[in-house]
Amino acid sequence: MWHHTTNLFYSKTIAAVLIDVLLGTILGFIAGLTPGIHSNTFASLTLIYSSKFSNPGVIIISSSIAYTIANILPTVLLGVPDEETAIAVHPANELVLEGRGFEAVTISAISSFLAVVISFLLYPAVWFLSVNSSTVRSFTPVALIAISAFLILTERGDEYGGRYSGWRKRLYAFLVFSVSGFAGIVAFQVSGYVENPAGSILLPLLTGLFGVPILIQTTAGRIPPQIVKWRRPDSNAVSAGTLAGFLVSLFPGVSSGVATVLATVGIRDREGYVAAVSAANSSNAVLCFFMLITASRARSGAAEALRQLGDYPSPIEVIILAIASASIALLLTLAASRVAFSYLSRLQFSKLSIAVLIFLVALTHTLTGFMGIIVLFVSSIIGMSAPLLGVRRANCMGCLIILVLLHYL
């Protein structure tokens, strides 16, 4: 167990801690690879069976960090999103269609790793702002409204679309944002019908809004051979993502999905988009633990599991675990993508897309039942509207932003 004043290795041998780090990292990696499974699932299970582990807190932190690095793989390989990677689906898949899928994975994984490291520098800021948490809480709705307005108002008109083309696109963006928000409200109203404890209404909601439209659009031809090329992420995009993860970790009730929206506002190139989303996810995961330490407030499922354990890690313990887990997960993610792309290029888009769609329907039914199928169908229609209207898919994140706004207003 951890205490604020004790060292990580005080009561445990280094070998025992390393085993727990490796176990947690592997669990987080598996969660990242598996559509519909979140690291919070393993955090909850670790909490339930905490007596069976020598140090469950190590496993929870390690799995949470590893998940944010590995969860890009289903997004790139299959177009299947989760909350953290939803708006990166389209840019990442475009890179796959150009034979640059491995490049997309390297951008994402390295961005996540760098964000983990940079996040440590923000601990003093987290501590300072946690002291003024009431002010931060009161500012939350204002921040969300500003993010939403900026997202919609930065839509650009068609080059030859006429004088009012830009405003027409902004109206379309507002409609997509609003309808997605309404879908999110209804989805969470019916979430009580999900009986499977491993299921979440977010699976059909986000898959329909972001994943299914991509799969429907890529139903012809073959996946081109993938070039094994490393790509260093843009430092500005990584910084923007890390800062977004930091800001969102301060606000209660604001999910990491909102961090991805904030991170990508103003970013137009696909590589920067992927880098910013990945950095936001990883920094948010780390900084949620820092918020737990400084203010005893849980901003994520993993942090809540740690809080229920009763013993909080110290900042230096979080740093050690995060770096160790991120390093291992980075290597595992790059190795897995290298193997996966060697097989993926042999498949036809049509067969792969149909197979993934069938899998998603089956997974949705298994985890969320018939109500999940309905949510998947309706959200898929809404998700298709964004590209048909020529606006950014990020507007579909209204499904989460409006929910949080209603919580505060």
Image (cartoon, helix red, strand yellow):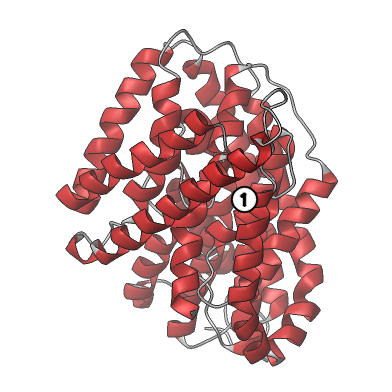
Q: Nearer the viewer, residue 350 or 113?
A: 350
Image location of residue 248, percent across then percent down? 63, 68
The residue carrying pointer 1 sits among few (fewer than 14), some (14 to 19) or many (20 or more) residues within 10 Å by Cα, namely many
Badge count: 1
Name the element at disc 1. helix
The residue at 70%/61% (across/down) is: 244
Q: Along the horizontal axis of the image, is 272 left or right of 359?
A: right
The residue at 74%/43% (across/down) is: 267
Give the vertical position of 363 relative to 388 (above or below). below
Give the vertical position of 317 relative to 23 (above or below). below
Q: Nearer the viewer, residue 299 or 157?
A: 157
Image location of residue 143, percent across then percent down? 65, 70
Give the vertical position of 259 relative to 339 (above or below). below
Q: Quadrant of residue 46?
A: bottom left
Query: Label 1 sits on what residue type?
Result: Ile
Q: Nearer the viewer, residue 351 or 137?
A: 137
Kindly give the residue lying farthest to the front in the view shown: 163
Image location of residue 58, percent across then percent down? 54, 70
The residue at 26%/44% (across/down) is: 364
Image location of residue 376, percent across then percent down? 29, 43
Residue 71 visible, this angle: no
Badge 1 is on which residue?
152
